[in-house]
Amino acid sequence: MSTPSASDALSDDQLKSHESQSDEQPNKKRRRRSSSSRSKKNSALNRQLNVFKGITLLLLTLLVITLLTIGINYYFVSRENNILEAKLKVSLDMNENLEFDLNALKQEKSMLIKGIIPNLRQLELNKVIDLDDGYLKNITFSEKKMRNLNGYEYRLVLENPQLVSIYPEIKLYFFNGDGIQENTSIIGGGANDDIRSEVLRPGESTSYSAFIPFSDAASRPKYFRIIRSKHGSEKIAVENQQTLQLR
């Protein structure tokens, strides 16, 4: 049996070394492949993370811009509202002062007109105005339209408190807001009367109505004056006395 030579031993070692190297090469390739796969995964995750960070940063930026815009708009709107409220308050105060001054002027004017024209009364609609002057009991005014004419209708109530019959003779004068006489209504008194009156016996009451037209707002009656004549009542009283004497 022959012993192996040195060359054979060397070739065996080389063969083993070659085999070990050939075994290590696939392992290195696999390690390279796995490391390459991990690096790709890591790079993909990093890209996704960067995209997420970018979107988050963009959303945060938009949110900050939106909040700033809302805050700025709210500041200017609130400031504008405060300015408008202040202007409105000033306007309301001015209007109140003007209204107060206007009412004061109206009262002064009314007092002046009433002082110039004696026995002048305020004409008030839909209100019973007590007269309490002899047989003049009360008068009521209401707004009315007749034959396309605007005007007021009055209803005058008479009541005879005396013990003798009377013959009413009454004149009503109507004045506008400036105290200018605009119209007149006459009850009884003869040919110039607008309404013929009837004899009013003791304790008896009656009423008379008439329409007072006006052409525009300037001529609208604001005041009235009513005068009763004693001539008619004296005439009836004398006739009553003569009748009693004849009896």
Image (tube, rainbow, N blue to C red):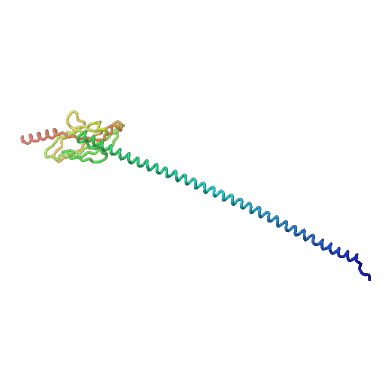
In the rendered image, which quarter contains the C terminus?
A: top left
Using the rendered view, name the quadrant where residue 19 is placed. Answer: bottom right
Rendering coords of residue 131 (x, y %): 19, 39
Residue at (72, 58) in percent of width and height: 35
Using the rendered view, name the quadrant where residue 104 is placed. Answer: top left
Rendering coords of residue 200 (x, y %): 15, 37
In the foreground, 246 or 90 = 90
Rendering coords of residue 121 (x, y %): 22, 37
Residue at the far front: name it: 6
Using the rendered view, name the quadrant where residue 208 is placed. Answer: top left
Residue at the far right: name it: 1
Up-down relation of residue 47 to residue 190 (above or below): below
Residue at the far bottom: name it: 1
Residue at (22, 38) in percent of width and height: 139
In the foreground, 66 or 16 = 16
In the rendered image, which quarter contains the N terminus?
A: bottom right
Q: Is residue 222 left or right of residue 82?
A: left
Q: Is residue 241 left or right of residue 94?
A: left
Q: Is residue 59 left or right of residue 191?
A: right
Residue at (49, 46) in percent of width and height: 72
Rendering coords of residue 97 (x, y %): 32, 40
The number of numbered badges drawn on the structure is 0
